[in-house]
Image (spheres, rainbow, N blue to C red):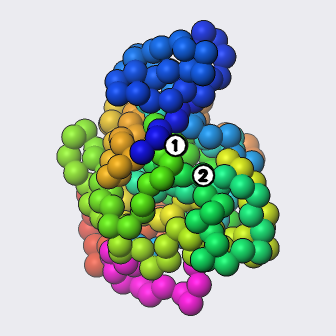
Amino acid sequence: MPEYRRILLDGAATQVRREGEELVSADGRVVGVEEAVHLPPVVPSKVVAVHLNHRSRVEEFMTSLPDAPTYFHKPTSSLNAHKGAVVRPERCKYLNYEGEVAIVIGRTARNISPAEAGDYIAGYTIGNDYGLHDFRDTDAGSMLRVKGSDTLCPLGPGLVTDWDFHGKRLRTLVNGKVVQDGSTDEMEWDMHYLVADIARTITLYPGDVLLSGTPANSRPVQPGDVVEVEVEGLGKLTNHIVTGPAPIRDDCGAQPTESEEVISTTFGGDWEFRGIRAPIR
């Protein structure tokens, strides 16, 4: 399956093709996969993410799915890349990983059927839909600060074309330990359905990204942690967590909170542990 990446090559953003352990540009320049400075593999005009889609995640929250998927928006300023640092701002504690498959649009799509949607998909990459749940009390509706803060949308390492999304394993690891383990077969709505659903009223342009949902066991990570998302056939997206150099300002806007809603959501809807959890640093 062809795989394309975007890297910083001699100071310029450059698309390259993976050939074994080397990345090769159109003019023949070569850099090793491990030595490359990666950029997001695509340049989207928008990133749309589905709230709930994997059945294991629905069961974890002891809820049920709506009749149709619901979505939120991650601004392009949240984009990050393979090996990039994910920032947990000072005064925040509840930064969660969410390993996902990301759909990349290849042709302008509007008012298409699910049966047609595959023709409008360029390929797939890996996403990690990080959430800063400290803002969930105020942003649960829009998810703007929760999911849209800077660095919270790593994509990569590459765009893989001709990838069949059926029956593919998805795993997230923190410091080498498997913390999420799911399959694309547990998705209620598949990739083609999601594209067609959004394109009913929102025009999708080449490069646009749809995040397709995460399996159970999204949990908080700490500065110093290394988070990897592996998807069968798409490779491995790696990021590390750092503390932001500046605290969240307290002279305007909603402030980070530690309500039961925030904490229970962070720990996967563990309502039975209200008031008796160990504190998080």
Element marked by disc 2:
strand
Left or right, residue 190 beside residue 269 = right
Residue 152 occupies quadrant: top right
> Mark 2 and 1 residues: CB-CB less than 8 Å, in contact?
yes
Front one among 9 and 237: 9
Q: How far from the left and from the top, in percent, is residue 251? A: 73, 43
Q: CA distance from mark 2 to mark 1?
A: 8 Å
Position of residue 182 relative to residue 250, above or below, is below
Front one among 278 and 141: 141
Residue denoted by label 1: 159
Q: Quadrant of the C terminus?
A: top left
Mark carried by residue 213: none
The stretch of residues the image draws in magenta is 55-71
Q: Amino acid at mark 2?
A: Ala
Q: Amino acid at mark 1?
A: Leu
Q: How far from the left and from the top, in percent, is residue 23? A: 46, 23
Residue denoted by label 2: 122
Front one among 262 and 143: 143
Q: How far from the left and from the top, in percent, is residue 89? A: 54, 38
